[in-house]
Amino acid sequence: MFLRRAFICALTALVGARAPGLRLPRQTETDGLQNMVTWDEYSLFINGTRVNIFSGEVHPFRMPVQSLHLDVFQKVKSMGFNAVSAYFHWGMHEPKRGEISFEGFRDLQPFFDAAMKAGIYIIARPGPYINAEVTGGGLPGWGQHTAGLWRTSNASFIDASAGYMKAIGTQLAANQITNGGPVILVQVENEYSGYQPPYTEDFAYESELKSLLRESGVTVPLTVNDAWPGGHFTDIDIYGYDSYPNGFNCSFPDDWLSGAVDSTEYFWGAHLQYSPQSPNAVFEFQGGSLDAWGGAGYENCAQLTGPAFERVFYKNEFAMSTTMLNLYMVFGGTNWGGIAHPGVYTSYDYGAAIAEDRTLREKYYELKLQANFRAVSPAFLTSRPINIFNTQSSFTGNQALKTTQVLDAVGNKTGFYVVRQLDASIDAVQTYTLTVPTSIGTLTIPILGGNLALNGKDSKIHVVDYEAGQSTLLYSTGEILTWATIDERDVVLVYGNSGELHETAFKFSSAPPAATVISGTGKIKTQVLSNNSLALQYTTTGQTVVEIGNNTLLYILDRESAYQFWVLHLPSAGAFAQFDTANPIVIKGGYLIRSVASTGNTLAFTGDLNSTHPVSFEIIAPGAFTSATLNGVKLSLAKTKYGTLTAQKTAVLPTVTLPDLSTLQWKTADSLPEIQPQYSDALWTVANHTTTINALAPLTPVVLYAGDYGFHTGNILWRAHFTATGAEEGFAVHMQGGAAFGYSVWLDATFIGSWEGDPNFADFNGTHAFPGGGLRKASTHVLTIVQDHMGNEEDWWAAGNDFQTPRGVLDYHFIGSNSTSVTIWKVAGNLGGEDYVDTTRGPLNEGGLFGERQGWHLPGFNDAAWARGAPTQGIAHAGVAFYRTTFNLNVPQGVDYPLAIALTKSMTPSNFRAQIYVNGYSFGKYVNNIGPQSVFPVPQGILNYNGLNTLAISLWANDAGGARIDSLALKLTAQIESSMGAVENQPLTVWTSRPGAF
Ligand code: IPT
């Protein structure tokens, strides 16, 4: 029976839902528009069945190769997750007001289709605001010159965003589960939690956005992610919040805040306060960290949020019955082109479980353990934490530990005990025993003597009266990886850290059968308990298999062994076949096992191997399956004493020969002809606005904000023509480009100085002396400024319009002469500005350097007339040079060999910036003097793995002495035999003449 939300709300109001301990009647709620995705106070339901949502964030626009979405989704799925949360980028889809595009890499259909193919639900987050470390936080460039209070119900903002919201809404509606697609939830806005005073939460804005989505046909439940459980935007189907407990400083990857766990305990009360009628939902939980220009690098972020972090914090969320948990990010991808806001660089690896080159970190394998446990623990889906704020020393007696008791409030049987350090920062070993109520009375575990241990930054979930098929685990301190009933035998897999002492007890309906080690070197101690229960004590080392009577098989694993297991499901039929969870097949071994299917008595696995050593597999499957293949190759199977199948396989990793970039023939041309006397800037945009909607009133006679003229990305160039009074000694200029930006200035053809950039400076006041002490009276001159645009700021504060923070010239004057005036200012950015030229590569791919305006970065440009010269030779003066080369690749099918362009830091001279274009796609922005990134992954599909590639590089030397790239190489970042689907190249469209290019 479905209760309408309105009714629940009324009921809530009537009985005062905020009273502690109050339980709402347990009913499934619906938004009234469909009944496939519903919810209650405990969990989400899909088609009437409770589902655990464990999902990870992936951004389609950060992976432009459409045919690689499936690889990422399959990896997420094989980790045991069932959903992906995805932002969509308004500015990317509507780079010019009213011109909305879902073409090329912006087509969302391949993303949704890949999700269906992998069996992944989508939580769609279209904005209009997304934050996400993208330029403008997703708000389009034309917002720079569009009046209104952004992120409010101000009519001009609603007008501005409605077109996109309807267009994206229509796309999402077509791909909803109700229409046979993967979309199950749609989030409105993003962290609509902070409002620039005097503005406050704008309820009209909230309802306007909801209406726009509903009018577009979105019928699935709408969700909200409050920045913290702060009670904003609660008039929504499923309210949730965000949490990043370890913060974003990757420089100290082993330092955790001591209160990081303890201080989250209020989340539960906040949940009961703000959304008692829906599940405790965390729509963004820290899955990694962003890293800024000059930062510590993403490997450090992966360490900050590594396996130990995952164990402590995701289990802490388990302790608060967070049955909807999304990790931001699970695969970060790349800020190629101008996607980034100034706070991040080209890589958006994020230190996530799946790295930017799509390889798997140890974090991935730890997540797999937790995800698989959640997936087979339905009691969790109706659970409640019982002792919030009373967790210290509870159940363990150890003051240094906190243990949350999580009980199944509906089944009234199962309990979960989540143990972790009270002080999250410490590495001490805590020993403890667990005294807990069970169905046979209160027990102190371990029963067979000894102690349990929690080794430093760790957390464990101990279960009590836990059902695994026909078997009941009276308790288990060894954590459950998964269980499956196969041929009427319950196979239970438990794990612990290597060498740890654990106990698992089973409860039988009659006298317990004998327990025998049937495989492995581990030993067990047993003791019969009351009520036909049998306790087994063991240490978790390697893999030991214990047979308990005929109907239960217990795998005792250490963590390393546990990492190797994959839980897959035989697909059913129809469009949702890959979502089926009815027929588990468990397989041990391999770097990645993606899928299993069956024909007759054969199991067909697909998977990836990364080792040239033989990989041992063990398959736990119904006995009817007597043969198996991996990637179509028959496995030679043996049978264990206890009925599972084993096989071995060695990866085939063919050698590929990569071009040596240093010996290729490179061509070069000057990309700053603008400073030459004969250059004409007649086709440049005249910067002559005298008014702006920008909140920052210009200090200059004309507005010199690039965004006001439609330029929102890449390098921006300015030209100032003036006639000298004779008194000018130099030029002082206040430039702004965003954190880590730089600029260089020329007087006519003479270089007069640069600001080389600093991650802590978004703007800079420079003074630049004119050569020879001054200028001749009445002489005419032109100043040329090249500046970096690091992306527009985010707009976290609604109504704050921070994203309009200008890029350009904030102020200037001539040193020595107050009376000199610039007769005309001109500006150039990417060719065409908002009418950008390259619709294939989108609005943010190219900037305003001469070479970019001309399309020199594109394949097929004829550089025959160019001189020979390589970026490793560089230039001996300040300026901008362009380099081009081509090479062939021939990588065989059946492997995943991710490639990267690796630079090494040049020490002298050190101030320069380079952009790396691969087949016309901008896949690297390198700042030698800031870093940290020097290795730039480029996905297959941007790189043509079977044919010709064009590599183009712009080199902007900030110093009078010039610059060169120290070394440049194409390198493999992994070698994997892979079953990933065929990769189709994105359109690698070639140069065509660019009318109006200047
Ligand atoms: C949260 C944003 O919602 C998300 O878009 C992203 O920017 C993330 O931060 C950081 O990577 S905001 C949260 C840190 C308060």
Image (spheres, grey):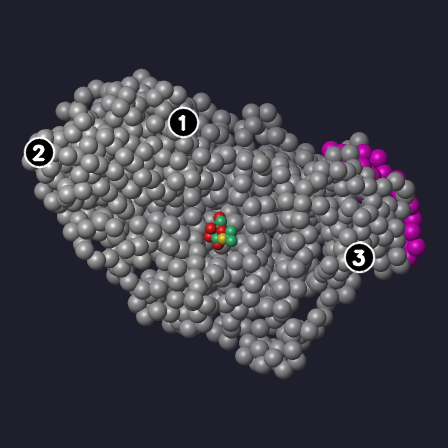
Is residue 981 left or right of 815 when viewed as pictured? right
Of badges 3 and 1, nearer the viewer stands 1
For residue 820: magenta?
A: no
Q: For the image shown, how many numbered marks are present on the structure? A: 3
Which segment did they paint magenta?
Answer: 522-547
Of badges 3 and 2, nearer the viewer stands 2
Mark 2: which secondary structure? loop
Is residue 236 left or right of 170 when viewed as pictured? right
In the picture as drawn, the residue positioned furthest to the top comes out as 663
Mark 3: which secondary structure? strand
Measuring from the top left, give residue 839's x and y in whole percent: 25, 48
For residue 545: magenta?
A: yes
In terms of image quadrants, where is residue 922? Answer: top left
- Residue drawn at (36%, 58%) of the image: 801
Is residue 328 left or right of 495 when viewed as pictured? left
Badge 1: how crowded within 10 Å, few (<14), some, or many (20+)?
Answer: some
Badge 2: how crowded within 10 Å, few (<14), some, or many (20+)?
Answer: few
For label 2, the residue is 777
Distance between mark 3 and mark 2 Cα atoms: 93 Å
